[in-house]
Image (spheres, rainbow, N blue to C red):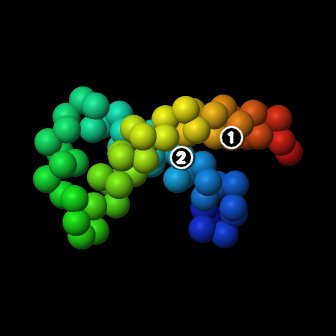
Amino acid sequence: MSAIFNFQSLLTVILLLICTCAYIRALAPSLLDKNKTGFLGIFWKCARIGERKSPYVAFCCIIMAFTILFSE
């Protein structure tokens, strides 16, 4: 089943996207800062969410890891 139709997989993909974009922006900010609008602006927005809401994102990653490990 694809991640679009499985809600848990969709949340996992979104969390991984946020964490990856925040990590890339920490290493090379110029890659994401030049594309603040348009389709590639999604990655810049994900990086901003990862930077500003990092405690909440980290908590969600921990919860998601436990649900993946200990669910069916």
**Residue 6, can we see it?**
yes
Rendered residue at 82%/35% (across/down): 70
Image position of 8 (left or right of 45): right
> Which residue position holds label 2?
15
- Residue pictured at 61% horizontal, 54% vertical: 11
Q: Who is closer to the viewer here, 54 or 21?
A: 54
* Label 1 residue SS: helix
Mark 2–mark 1 contact, CB under 8 Å?
A: yes
Mark 2, other Cα within 10 Å: few <14 / some 14–19 / many ≥20 = some
Q: Amino acid at mark 1?
A: Met
User: Label 1 crowding class (10 Å Cα cut-off): few <14, some 14-19, many 20+?
Assistant: some
Residue at the disc numbered 1: 64
Q: For numbered disc 2, what is the local secondary structure? A: helix
The dot on residue 35 is none
How far apart in space, not on screen, are marks 2 and 1 (Cα)?
9 Å
Q: Amino acid at mark 2?
A: Leu
Residue 26: quarter of image = top left
Where residue 72 appears, x then y in whole percent? 86, 45
Residue 41 horizontal/vertical position (percent): 27, 61
User: In the picture, which quadrant includes the N terminus?
Assistant: bottom right
Q: Position of residue 17 (x, y in %)?
A: 45, 48
Outermost residue to the front: 52
Q: Is residue 14 above or below residue 19?
A: below
